[in-house]
Image (cartoon, rainbow, N blue to C red):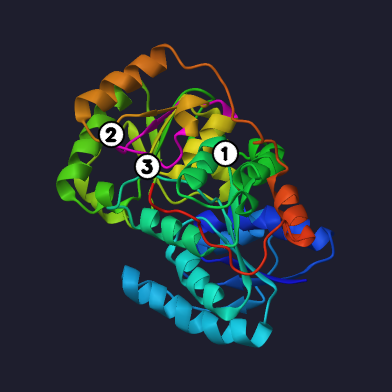
C-alpha cells in the first residue's frame, strides 16, 4: 500500500510519528507530506530533530495566512501531488488547517481518508479547530478515536460502526517513547528551577492572546498565582509581543518556545500546569501533573473525568482560587484506557487489513 501521511503544524508532528513508524515497520510505502503551515525553527525543525522524524518527501511551503487563504493554499498545493502519487490512503491528524485542506482534496481524489484523533468535540463553533475536526470526520473513511467519549460522539452523529475505531492516543505513544530522554534534559538547571518548585503556563489560542482585555485578565491572574508558586511561561510566537508589553512580575519567567524534550521535562517536573492547549491537557494527565485549562470548554473531556485536568475558564477569581486549591491538594493520578503507547500500531494494523472500510462510507444519520 502507498499511504500519504500529512503533517503541517507543531501539534501534528507528535501525532504522525507513531503512525508512520508502525506503517513502515509493517511494510507499507509511506510518503510524508509537510504542508509548511508551521515553518520556523522553534516551531518546526527542532521537533523533527528531537523526535527523529525523517525529512519530508514533499514540502508544500504554504506559510502563514488567514484561515481561508491558508486552507486554500494547502488544497492548491496538495491536489496535484495527490494526483501524481495516487495513494491508497491519506492519513491526516488533529484539527489544524492542513488537516482540513488535505482531507478535502483526498475525499475527492479516490483515495481513502483516515482521520487520526477523530470524534473530539468542544461544541464551540467559535473555535476554528472545531469546524476543522467536524468537517474532516464527515469526509473520512476511517475514524480513529483516541478515547471512549470520542467514540460516543461519532456514534451519536450517525457514523457506521465499521468506520469507528478506538485506537488510543498517538500523542501518548510519542510521550512514552521519549519520556526517559526528556527526563534526562538539563532544562531545569538551565532555567534555575527545581522539581516541583514552579508552575508551567502556555497560552496561544486567539480567544486568549488576541483580545487585549482577555489577555490582561489572564496575566493578572497569573501574577497572583505566581506569588504562591513561581511561573515559567514559554512564549508562543503569537503571544510573545503582548507578553513583553504587559510587564509581568519577576516571579513570572517568560522564556523562548521550548523544544519537545525540554517541554516534556518542564511538564513532568511542574507542580501545576495552566494552559489553553489540548495536547497539554492530555500530556499532563499521562504524567500525573495537575492541569488547569484556561478555556470555557474542552474537546478532551476525558482529561476531566479520567485525568488530572480542570476547566477554569478566563475568570480571574476562579483561576486564582482553583490554582491555590490544587497547589494545596493535588488531584490523584489517573489515565484513560488505551493510552498505553500502542495507538500507532493499532492504526497501522487496521489500515493494512482494510479495517472494514469500503469506498467512501458516510454517516447514516446526522439528525442527532
Residue 47: horizontal and vertical position, in percent? Answer: 59, 57
Disc 2/disc 3 C-alpha distance (Å): 9 Å
* Magenta region, main secondary structure: loop
Residue marked by disc 1: 147
- Name the disc covering residue 276, or none: 3
Residue at image location 67% in from the left, 82% down from the top = 86
Q: Residue 129: percent from the left, percent from the top? A: 39, 55
Q: Nearer the viewer, residue 358 or 345?
A: 358
Under circle 1, the secondary element is loop
Q: Which mark is residue 313?
A: 2
Q: Nearer the viewer, residue 108 or 67?
A: 108
Q: Residue at x 50, y 56 (%)?
A: 364
Residue 234 image offset from top left, x and y in percent: 42, 45
Corner quadrant of residue 81: bottom right
Q: Is residue 165 left or right of residue 362?
A: right
**Residue farthest along the top direction in this orientation:** 329
Front disc: 1 or 3: 1
Q: Is residue 2 above or below residue 361?
A: below
Q: Which residues are magenta?
A: 287-301
Judge whether residue 224 is colored magenta: no
The crowding category of the residue bearing disc 2, from other C-alpha atoms within 10 Å (few below 14, some 14 to 19, many at least 20), is: some
Amino acid at each position: 500500500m502507498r499511504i500519504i501521511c500529512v503533517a503541517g503544524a507543531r501539534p501534528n508532528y507528535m501525532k504522525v510519528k507513531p503512525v508512520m513508524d508502525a506503517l513502515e515497520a509493517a511494510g507499507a510505502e509511506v510518503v510524508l507530506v509537510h504542508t509548511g503551515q508551521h515553518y520556523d525553527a522553534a516551531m518546526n525543525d527542532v521537533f523533527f530533530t528531537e523526535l527523529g522524524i525523517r525529512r519530508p518527501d514533499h514540502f508544500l511551503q504554504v506559510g502563514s495566512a488567514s484561515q481561508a487563504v491558508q486552507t486554500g493554499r494547502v488544497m492548491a498545493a496538495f491536489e496535484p501531488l495527490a494526483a501524481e502519487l495516487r495513494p491508497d490512503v491519506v492519513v491526516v491528524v488533529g484539527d489544524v488547517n492542513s488537516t482540513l485542506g488535505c482531507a478535502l482534496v483526498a475525499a475527492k481524489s479516490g483515495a481513502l481518508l483516515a482521520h487520526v484523533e477523530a470524534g473530539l468535540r468542544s461544541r464551540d463553533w467559535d473555535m476554528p479547530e472545531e469546524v476543522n475536526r467536524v468537517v474532516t470526520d464527515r469526509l473520512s473513511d476511517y475514524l480513529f478515536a483516541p478515547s471512549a467519549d470520542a467514540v460516543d460522539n461519532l456514534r451519536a452523529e450517525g457514523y457506521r460502526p465499521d468506520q469507528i475505531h478506538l485506537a488510543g492516543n498517538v500523542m501518548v505513544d510519542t510521550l512514552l517513547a521519549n519520556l526517559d530522554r526528556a527526563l534526562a534534559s538539563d532544562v531545569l538547571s538551565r532555567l534555575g528551577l527545581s522539581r516541583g518548585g514552579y508552575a508551567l503556563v502556555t497560552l496561544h489560542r486567539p480567544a486568549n492572546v488576541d483580545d487585549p482585555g482577555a489577555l490582561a485578565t489572564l496575566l493578572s491572574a497569573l501574577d497572583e498565582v505566581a506569588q504562591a508558586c513561581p511561573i515559567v511561561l514559554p512564549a508562543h510566537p503569537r503571544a510573545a509581543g503582548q507578553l513583553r508589553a504587559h510587564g509581568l512580575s519577576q516571579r513570572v519567567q517568560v522564556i523562548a518556545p521550548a523544544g519537545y524534550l525540554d517541554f516534556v521535562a518542564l511538564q513532568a517536573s511542574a507542580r501545576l500546569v495552566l494552559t489553553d492547549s489540548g495536547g497539554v491537557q492530555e500530556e499532563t494527565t499521562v504524567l500525573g501533573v495537575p492541569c488547569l485549562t484556561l478555556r470555557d470548554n474542552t474537546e478532551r473531556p476525558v482529561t476531566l473525568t479520567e485525568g488530572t485536568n480542570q476547566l477554569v475558564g478566563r475568570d480571574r477569581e476562579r483561576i486564582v482560587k482553583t490554582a491555590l486549591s490544587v497547589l494545596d491538594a493535588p488531584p490523584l493520578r489517573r489515565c484513560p484506557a488505551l493510552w498505553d503507547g500502542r495507538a500507532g500500531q493499532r492504526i497501522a494494523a487496521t489500515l493494512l487489513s482494510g479495517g472494514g472500510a469500503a469506498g467512501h462510507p458516510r454517516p447514516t444519520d446526522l439528525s442527532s
